[in-house]
Image (cartoon, rainbow, N blue to C red):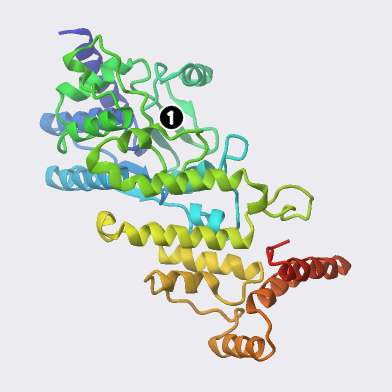
Amino acid sequence: MDLLEEKVSSVKERLKAEFLADSRPWVVTFSGGKDSTAVLHLTIEMLLEMKKEGTPQNKKLYVVSSDTGVEMPLIEDYVADKLDQIRNFAKKEHLDIEVTKLSPKVTESFWTLLIGKGYPSPNQTFRWCTDRMKIRPATYFLKKLTDQNRSILMLLGVRSDESASRAASIEKRNDNHRGFSMHPDIPNAFVYSPIKDWSNAEVWTFLSTHPAPWGRHDDMMQLYDKGSGEGDCNIALNPQSQSCGKTRFGCWVCTVVSQDKSMANMLKNPEDMWMQPLHEFRNLLEVYRNDPSKRQPRRRNGQKSIGPFKLSTRKELLEKLLSTERDLHKELAGKTLISDEEIVQIQEEWLNDGDFFESAIKIAKKYGRDVAYNSVKAFNEDEQEFISALCEQNGINKELIDYLMQCEHSYRHHTIRYKVFQEFETIIERFAKGQLNEV
């Protein structure tokens, strides 16, 4: 038996012993990447061996995956397909496995925060996306599960070999006598990393030489090949070659990194070039974030500084997003880039900024999205028609009235309101010069 097979056997024996040691349920976090796939693969093989031995499964295994709503379409499809395969396999084999996909609340989704509230696209110093789209949904689910069962054990596909920072993080953990560490935020939730000592080469060799219980791994390897641009993920054929294991797939809108290398490499493949408009939109978000003219000159708390995206910028981004969705209708195969619920929530956020003309709903309908919306705060159709007619009769630009109303609305909670008149003057002056924009 070679060293890798010894590791595989050792991990499964350890998993089996820990699984039978108590009744707390297990949670495997599954991203679709190689490490979480390897952990899930080993865990399910362990359950199958127990079944073959006649050992009853004494607790449920939860397979949990995060859906941010802005994952690269190819990755979104891949993960959804894998989750379906795992569900069907568990049902066929009568394994007590529950597969769950977690999503952020609509009030905390990427598009609600960026286009609705005007959050600038994330960067290293303001990385608001990970917490709201991944950590919070997972924490809510895990806390609920822990409360129901007193304690849970999470199996993570993290390895010391990934990076120096990951190795340092693992080293800092204060493991108990069973090799588990406490979850930093969830009481009575423990963490175990069964392949933390595996090398990158060992993970790829394992996946290359061991068929997945629920299907296959070669489609995952093809995705890594595309994302790396190297085409050598199947290093079992050449263990001395440099692996593409450091390839990172994520959200197609990610501006935390200066360059989305995985998307750039994907676009080198003729069959994936259709995603070019998504890449261009992502680059536009980065440009707008760094352009002060696209952002308010003050923060939400009134502090003078570069603030959120202006409402005019947010309207522009929503229009661009929906036009991109329309142009990629065939390639998206019925999927949308933004949900109806998010569009409604965006309209609610815009209403808080003084947009009483239901601009988000109108933009959506312009691009074929029939979004159901009814607000008691926004102007109804009769009121909108009345204001439009009034503006037309008096030769007043309705957009000017819209900006003035937004400005006045932004001061609704201020006890001292003299500045609103100064801003009125600025808006009217800029309008007269053909430079109408938000203040």
- Where residue 435 sits: x, y (%)? 69, 63
Q: Nearer the viewer, residue 395 or 230?
A: 395
Which residue position holds label 1?
Answer: 191
Which quadrant of the rendered structure holds the N terminus? top left
Residue 143 visible in the snapshot: no
- Tell me the residue at 47%/41% (across/down): 254
Q: Nearer the viewer, residue 150 or 113?
A: 113
| Vertical arrangement, residue 438 with respect to residue 298, above or below | below
- Where residue 332 sits: x, y (%)? 28, 55
- Tell me the residue at 55%/63% (across/down): 315
Quadrant hosting residue 154: top left
- Where residue 33 sits: x, y (%)? 32, 33
Residue 297 visible in the snapshot: yes
From the viewer's perspective, is 215 left or right of 127?
A: left
From the viewer's perspective, is 93 left or right of 19?
A: left
Which quadrant of the rendered structure holds the C terminus? bottom right
Quadrant hosting residue 10: top left
From the viewer's perspective, is 389 left or right of 72?
A: right
- Tell me the residue at 61%/86% (across/down): 388
